[in-house]
Image (cartoon, grey):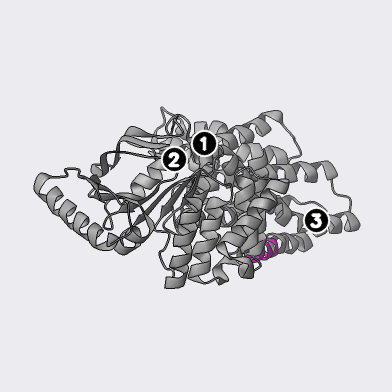
Amino acid sequence: MRTFLIIFEREIKAYFDSAIAYIFAIVFLMITCGIFINDFFLVSVAEMDSYFTPLPYLMILFLPAVSMRLWAEERKDNTYELLMTLPVKKIFIIMGKYASSVVFFLITLLGTLPVVIMLFVLGKPDPGKIFASYMGVFFLGALYLAIGIFLSGVTGDQIVAYLLSVFVLALYYASGNDMVASILDGLWPELQAGTFLRDVFSAVPHYQAFTRGIIDLHSILYFTTLVVFALWLNDVVLRRDKI
Amino acid sequence: MLKVDRVVRKYGDFTAVDNVSFEIQPGEVVGFLGPNGSGKTTLMRVITAYMLPTKGTVYVDGLDVIRNPLEVSSRIGYLPESNILYPQMRSGEFLLFVGRARGLSGKRLKERFDWCVDAMKIAPVLRKRNMECSKGFKQRISLASALIHDPGYVILDEPTLGLDPLQIFMVRDFLKLISKEKVVLFSSHILQEVAAMAKRVIIINEGHIIGDARFEDRENRTERLEKIFTDAVLSARESGGKREEVRQ
């Protein structure tokens, strides 16, 4: 636990010590809020559906920029050797790094609170639905970051880590798309692979449940299990480096 | 005691370290001499539990590096060849980070921090970011971070790399100071450096130990080591890696 906190503290400071963090936060908020505000004044309904619907796609582009540095930068700066020779369990280092990226993302997400306040001032939105939607964003973001830290661990180049993460996340999220599912079903009708991927594997139905205002334990377990799996894979990659 | 027991380390089909064995007793300063790519860094990485040996093992205080990597790591202070400083961190902050990550806290951390700052003479740069420090200071901060937990075993990979002559003298004196009760193993590809700092020199070439020389006195040490090194390399070429034990 002590190691986790020490690593977490260093990593969170590292985020705010770099200009990239501020650029990320500003651009992310400008684009996500910009899209929403545009729709909001056209539709004039006090709800955030048009904020949460495109967010998973935008997060595919933005969150790898948060996770790409977590291991790739250590390898580039040669500090990887320092971390790997510390007398601590590597999983605590992974967790400290991962938690810092999640907290950084949450802090960025706090920047959208003025939008929520504005909705409550102008109308009567459903607070439960908004809260559940934010939970969905949190869980989906946490999963994206877990996949991102794992992929950052397999390369020493931050750009490669970023592109690899975007590619994998795009494939992963696309597996929940109805059109992609029907194409895959059409290719192998006897397997129904597209339907299987969309209903069982994809994050889309779970995220959509949150955005409808449903906080489902099944969805929470789904995201938590995948996060743990991705972090375990990260640990496997670090162990493999020693062999 | 540090015991390297028939260590083999392979990268795929390439054998970087081949069946290497030696022992080092506390109080010994041992220089690891060999050309670039001879396997020095790989062997040091195995000793520090950064890498696992393909065959054989290393014992530190009787602890097997394969079975007890964390316990072994806690006993070792390791300075890798490459710069290990976080560029954005301030030097003092970095040193405290390493100390805390190595389990120090409170009064003990402060004591060790003060000792390292004093021994390495890095007080002028404590508030500077690591990336703003000169190469010499960077190396000294790295060395301080390797010693912050007062390890019994000090493993230094090319510790004088990038230092000016005055700083090299400082490192030499410092190694002498700490070697009284510690095991010190350092590597270098510069023969004069090894001759000046070590009483025992292990010569490594193409992953094999080809010479193990001890010097009882300082007289003409560089010249004698030059001869031992040349003879060992030539002999190894003829015999395909035969080890030579030399006592001077």
Please, which chain is the residue tagged with disc 2 on?
Answer: B
Q: Is residue B51 magenta?
A: no
Please, which chain is the residue tagged with disc 1 on?
Answer: B
Along the line of sight, the residue nearer the viewer: A152 or B144 = B144
At a point 69% along the width and 45% down the height, the residue shown is A138
Query: 10 Å neighbourhood of mark 3: few (<14), some, or many (≥20)?
Result: few
Along the line of sight, the residue nearer the viewer: B149 or A32 = B149
With A233 as the anchor, is A212 left or right in this view? right
| Three-letter code for the amino acid on which mark 2 is drawn | Ala
Disc 3 is placed on an element classified as: helix
Please, which chain is the residue tagged with disc 3 on?
Answer: A
The residue under label 3 is: A113
Q: Which residues are magenta?
A: A21-30
1 and 3 marks in contact (CB < 8 Å): no
2 and 1 marks in contact (CB < 8 Å): yes
Q: In which image quadrant can residue B227 be found?
A: bottom left
Q: Main secondary structure of the magenta part?
A: helix
Can residue A162 be seen in the rendering of this structure? Answer: no
Q: In which image quadrant can residue B36 be found?
A: bottom left
> From mark 1 to mark 3, how far is it between C-alphas?
45 Å
At a point 46% along the width and 58% down the height, the residue shown is A76
At a point 73% along the width and 50% down the height, the residue shown is A49
Percent of width and height locating residue A116: 82, 54
Which residue is at the far left? B238
The residue under label 1 is: B70
| Three-letter code for the amino acid on which mark 1 is drawn | Leu
Disc 2 is placed on an element classified as: loop
